[in-house]
Amino acid sequence: MAKRNREHSTLGDVLKDFIASSRKLQKGMDKVSAQQAWYSVMGEAISKYTDNVLLDRDTLYVQLTSSVLREELSYGKEKIIRLLNEELGSDLIKKVVLR
């Protein structure tokens, strides 16, 4: 009979360990986290003009419906990157492309 580990772990800890052990799962979770961070950091006013948010490698692609908003946000890309990475807790995003 196999010995069981008597140490107790929470389901959240087990899931984090499982995701960390799989590179594909971690990439998928990063994509979802980046999308959620965009909506959280940018707020409701900008979110309603956002069509799509996609993380590919270290670049966040954001599709906006307003050309005026796109132009305004382009001036603050460095700040947006910093705020998003703070929200994510890691330097996941290196570049933002506004479409």
Image (cartoon, rainbow, N blue to C red):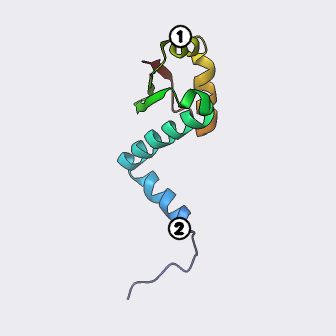
Q: How far separated are the C-alphas under marks 2 and 1?
A: 44 Å
Eye-nearest disc, 2 or 1: 1
Q: From this viewpoint, which residue is outermost toward the left?
A: 24
The C terminus lies in which quarter of the figure?
A: top left
Q: Is residue 35 left or right of residue 42?
A: left
Residue 85 or 4: which is nearer the viewer?
85
Q: Which residue is drawn at 53% across and 67% down?
A: 11
Q: What residue type is labelled 2?
A: Leu
Q: Are marks 2 and 1 in contact (CB under 8 Å)?
A: no
- Circle 1 crowding by C-alpha within 10 Å: few under 14, some 14–19, many from 20: few
The answer to whether residue 92 is above or below residue 68 is below
Which residue is at 55% across, 62% downward? 13
Q: Which of marks 2 and 1 is nearer the N terminus?
A: 2
Taking the spot 51% from the left edge, 33% from the top edge, the residue there is 92
From the viewer's perspective, is 79 left or right of 63?
Answer: right
As helix, strand or loop, the secondary structure at mark 2 comes to helix
Report the quarter where the N terminus lies.
Answer: bottom left
The numbered dot on residue 26 is none
What's the residue at 60%, 23% (across, down)?
80
- Frontmost residue, 5 versus 9: 9
Query: Disc 1 marks which residue?
Result: 71
Residue 52 higher or lower than 73, as above or below? below
- Circle 2 is placed at which residue position? 11
